[in-house]
Image (cartoon, rainbow, N blue to C red):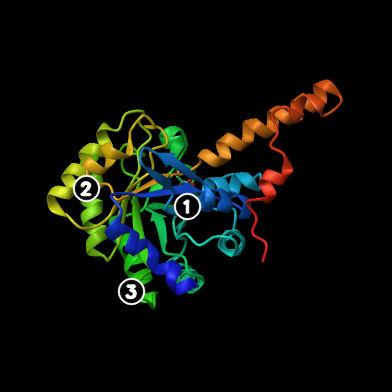
Amino acid sequence: MPELRRRRLRELLRICPVVKTIEVHSGLTGLIAEKTVVQDGEGLDQFDAMWISSLCDSTTRGKPDIELIDMSSRIRTIDEVMDVTTKPVILDGDTGGLVEHFTYNVRTLERMGVSAIIIEDKVGQKKNSLFGTQVRQTQDSIENFCEKISAGKDAQRTEDFMIIARIESLILEKGMEDALKRAMAYVEAGADGIMIHSRKPEPDEIFEFCDRFRDQDVTTPIVVVPTTYCDTYESELISHGVNIVIYANQLTRSAFPAMENTAKNILLNHRAREAEETLIPFYKIITLIDTI
Ligand code: SPV
Ligand code: MG
């Protein structure tokens, strides 16, 4: 039920050392996030939550990650995922759009049972953060972005829904001081969490941000996306005060080469026998899908 799912993220933040979140973009990837369990040492391990990435939602539709996929289409993806899963959903809300639209979208998402939206402090044509300064991207002013956060918080109807502010200062090379100043301002404006993003191969600037943020704020959840600094273990992130780790695109990036290789294999062999060796039997996929 939407209420139970919505509040589950806050509950997980209270009980988990870190909320492990995986990208999903369809019913099938939702089922993978929901049902993948591994034996890890003495116990079992699984993902806690799902991230509906703008990058992967766009890529799956063959479109660029520039806020081209409108909110109605994003809602269709969320609905498809929610229809077959129970874990909490964190939505990548891009810039959040116009404040006047953001407030309506907050209410819609909240009603659906989404637990959190993460909005990034950029304006104008948004491009994916991993492009960094290779493309033109403009950061929003602190004042404007704070207004958007506050308007969203005023619009929501429950205590559960979270608006998490994503800081792009390190991505856009605006420096650590700017990132920290923004973090404090966004929390003051009502943000329920801070996502700090980096495209460095090492986690040093993320660790520094987290340590310095935690010196001033011990409670506000910190969210990170270790795509480029993927050598970093969850335990290291936890030791620097991180609460949510998002594996933001790995399912899409693993499926793409697998599908491309299969297409090439069939073309080269003029039949599917050779490709068959690398394929999962269909009955194994069907076992993921519940019968009612
Ligand atoms: C996404 O997954 O769409 C994100 C994270 O926003 S990143 O692609 O690293 O910008
Ligand atoms: Mg995104």
The residue singled out by tag 3 in the image is 159
Label 1 beta carbon less than 8 Å to ligand 1: yes
SS class, disc 2: helix
Toward the top, the furthest residue is: 268
* Circles 3 and 1: CB atoms closer than 8 Å: no
SS class, disc 1: strand
Placement of the C terminus among the 4 image quadrants: bottom right
Question: Please, what is the three-letter code of the amino acid marked with disc 2?
Answer: Leu
Q: Nearer the viewer, residue 233 or 182?
A: 233
Say if residue 103 shows up in the picture: no
Q: Is residue 281 left or right of residue 185?
A: right
Which badge, 2 or 1, comes first in the chain's sequence? 1
The label shown at residue 51 is 1
Quarter location, residue 82: bottom right
The residue singled out by tag 2 in the image is 180
Q: Position of residue 173 (x, y in %)?
A: 32, 36
> Which residue sits at x=26%, y=65%?
189
For residue 47, above or below residue 226: below
